[in-house]
Image: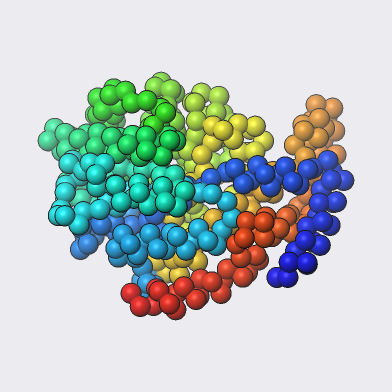
Amino acid sequence: MKEELIKKEFNVAKEKYAALGVDVEKAIEKLNKISISIHCWQADDVGGFENPDGELSGGIQVTGNYPGKASTIDELKGDIEKVLTLVPGNHRLSLHAIYGDFTDGFVDRDKIEPKHFKTWIDWAKQHNVKLDFNSTFFSHPKSGNYSLSSFDPGIRRFWKDHLRCCRRIAEEMGRQQGDACIHNIWVHDGEKDKTVSRIQHRQLLKESLDEVLSEKISTDYLKDTIECKLFGIGSESYVVGSHEFYLGYAVKNNMMLTLDAGHFHPTEGIADKISSILLFVPEINLHVSRPERWDSDHVVILNDALLELSQELVRSGQMDKLHVGLDYFDGSINRIGAYVVGIRATQKALLQALLEPTEKLRQFEKENKNFQRMAYLEELKALPWNAVYNYYCLQQGVPVGDDYIKEVESYETKIGSKR
């Protein structure tokens, strides 16, 4: 798209938004400050580097076998570097514990250390990327149906040690990058069919978390967050870490809660949860995904659910307490393209929310002018927000419009197709 046309369309959009009392330049400035935590596991179908021949288990499944997935740390780093050239803004990278550098030999998860992530820390510094972290309880011989909530004290001990290791790794990441590393705790524990000992398993999970999290680490370096789920593959009937369990745990312990867009009932959105949960927990971590009738982790696209979520984030006025991350893994299409589509879709939804005359709409509500509120919200739907996003891309020196498609295709020809 020609630069002159982009600027012309932007100036028209700027005037139209100004007529509604919206400062477009400020909206772009706010969007540019939102760093999306990009998930490393889209690039390699959640394989990691702990065991190249390992198979996924514990509620994790990737569909598709599109060629070109990353199989080494260097390949994955190269893919992420390419993605960062195709999206505007400065972003974070979220790593799972199985993505460490284990080139010196296998290290089991209860023994991993910060040194196994030194190459990632160095890479992040080089590319001005902040790191987040995730404990990995799935896809391991000791996963089974239960980990931290297992009746077997030896199994619980192993996974508690893993969690301790992960917290120390995340702490070191935060220390070296000068910004707190968000450490996400998602535990797959549960069963496929009817479960009698529900409260016993939940008591064990609570005790395991209490024991490990009692080790206090400065939030300047580490922010722990716990992630709930309704059901998973192989745990359709019962998941120990339900929304009610983790919401109660987060409130009681004044800690961050993770909401994944695909971890609730098939038709249940998470947008309306934001305004309630923010009143009782210090911060919220988001895993933006796209469930197709269930937690199927499809690539994020610009749909109503994503827009409603973004609107609630912005309308809350507490973006400093909200962290946006992605969580999907689709092996059926070009993986670099999947990243770019998802990141851009999330940014576009956030931009639309930032281009809303929120204070004017609030005033309508105070004056009981519900018709006017509805009319403004309807008019906003047709305003040229995409011209603003295109201009933002131009400002940032990344492909505008559909120009990134050619970039992705070129990368596939030169790099991906040779793997």
For the point 31% across and 59% down, the residue is 73
For the point 29% across and 22% down, the residue is 214
Q: Nearer the viewer, residue 57 or 132?
A: 132
For the point 16% across and 55% down, the residue is 104
Q: Nearer the viewer, residue 273 or 162?
A: 162
For the point 57% across and 51% down, the residue is 89
**Whether residue 294 is visible:** no
Q: Quadrant of residue 360?
A: top right
Q: Quadrant of residue 87?
A: bottom right
**Whether residue 271 is visible:** yes
Give the residue at the far front of this rendering: 126
Q: How many dots with numbers?
A: 0
User: 304 left or right of 180?
Assistant: right
User: 292 left or right of 387?
Assistant: left
User: 152 left or right of 8?
Assistant: left
Q: Position of residue 410 (x, y in %)?
A: 50, 76
Q: How is the image coloured?
A: rainbow
Give the residue at the far right of this rendering: 19
Q: Quadrant of residue 413?
A: bottom left
Q: Position of residue 93 (x, y in %)?
A: 43, 49
Q: Quarter of the image containing the C terminus?
A: bottom left
Q: Nearer the viewer, residue 77 or 342?
A: 77
Q: Position of residue 29 (x, y in %)?
A: 67, 44
303 relative to 367, above or below: below
Q: Position of residue 216 (x, y in %)?
A: 31, 23
Q: Nearer the viewer, residue 309 or 1?
A: 1
User: 294 left or right of 209?
Assistant: right
Q: Quarter of the image containing the N terminus?
A: bottom right
147 relative to 342, above or below: above
